């Protein structure tokens, strides 16, 4: 996915939030977006997700399936948690089984029958993350995904993202709290002064050596086949990805 001289401002005569942004995001990568408050991080994420359209320049090669979780999930909606996620799953052609899978992985299974309006901020944030992941996105854009999470879910999330990346998902994360700072093999962008630059030491796909634990080359890999009933395929695939395995559906 490439941004070519992209600029954005919210009103015609307002100042430019971002201008002349040119960069390429590689597939199968996690990109962390950093920068001071008000620098334009959320604007950049919305442009990448397709929520906003550039006022100048163009954005090309955006993947077809996009998942987006805003910093603040709009919980004031007339649904239960399960009802809302079922609606989102139908919109994205995802099986309902993924609702229970991600409710378990994100630790809110006991809340599925509650109205959205009764959720705490942290629990609502989990629902926002789940709806973004349900549709097996090729591009996942998360605005401050760690904000308000309980300690257990917060500790689990980097591994969940790594699993999705291993399954082929391009991930872009605004992470003000720097919970990804110890995760190896992460690209980093800095947003400041209306510009976007690669952080020092950011990945260069032409020369970087991929690492598994930050200490050396990836361990030797093996390919296995798993045979499951057809109706369970999507659930098993999602669970394998969530557990950190590079699982892909067979090509037909």
Image (cartoon, rainbow, N blue to C red):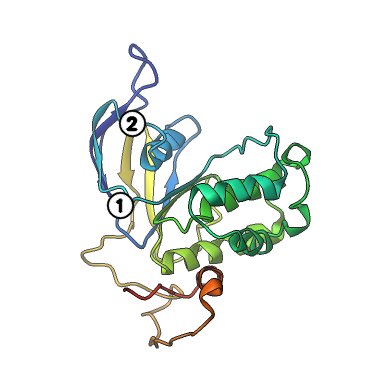
Residue at 56 percent across and 55 percent down: it is: 179
Q: Secondary structure at mark 2?
A: loop
Q: Is residue 235 above or below residue 117?
A: below
* Image spot of residue 1 (x, y percent): 28, 49
Q: Is residue 10 above or below residue 49?
A: above
Q: Is residue 67 left or right of residue 149?
A: left
Does the rendering let one see residue 131? yes
Contact flag, marks 1 and 2 (Cβ < 8 Å): no
Which quarter of the figure has residue 104?
bottom right
* Image spot of residue 199 (x, y percent): 35, 50
Does the rendering let one see residue 148? no
| Residue at the disc numbered 2 | 53
Q: Is residue 208 left or right of residue 103?
A: left
- How far apart marks 1 and 2 lie (CA) works out to 17 Å
Which quarter of the figure has residue 12?
top left
| Residue at the disc numbered 1 | 25
Residue at 72 percent across and 44 percent down: it is: 80
How busy is the neighbourhood of tag 1: few (under 14 within 10 Å), some, or many (20 plus)? some
Which quarter of the figure has residue 166?
bottom left
Q: Is residue 25 left or right of residue 82?
A: left
* Image spot of residue 96 (x, y percent): 60, 59
């Amino acid at each position: 996915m490439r941004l070519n001289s992209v600029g954005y401002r919210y009103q015609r005569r307002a100042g430019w939030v971002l201008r002349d942004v040119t960069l390429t995001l590689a597939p199968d990568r996690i990109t962390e977006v950093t920068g001071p408050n008000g620098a334009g991080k959320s604007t950049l994420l919305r442009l990448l997700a397709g929520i906003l359209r550039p006022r100048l320049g163009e954005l090309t090669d955006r993947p077809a399936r996009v998942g987006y979780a805003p910093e603040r999930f709009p919980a004031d909606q007339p649904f239960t948690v399960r009802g809302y996620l079922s609606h989102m799953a139908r919109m994205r052609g995802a099986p309902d089984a993924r609702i229970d899978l991600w409710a378990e992985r994100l630790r809110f299974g006991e809340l599925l029958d509650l109205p959205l309006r009764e959720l705490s901020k942290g629990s609502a944030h989990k629902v926002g993350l789940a709806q973004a992941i349900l549709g097996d996105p090729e591009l996942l854009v998360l605005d401050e995904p760690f904000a308000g999470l309980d300690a257990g879910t917060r500790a689990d999330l980097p591994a969940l993202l790594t699993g999705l990346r291993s399954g082929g998902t391009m991930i872009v994360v605004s992470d003000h709290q720097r919970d990804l700072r110890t995760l190896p093999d992460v690209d980093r962008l800095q947003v400041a002064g209306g510009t976007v630059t690669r952080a020092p030491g950011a990945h260069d796909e032409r020369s970087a050596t991929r690492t598994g634990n930050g200490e050396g080359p990836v361990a030797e890999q093996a390919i296995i086949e798993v045979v499951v009933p057809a109706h369970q395929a999507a659930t098993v695939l999602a669970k394998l990805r969530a557990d950190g395995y590079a699982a892909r559906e067979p090509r037909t």
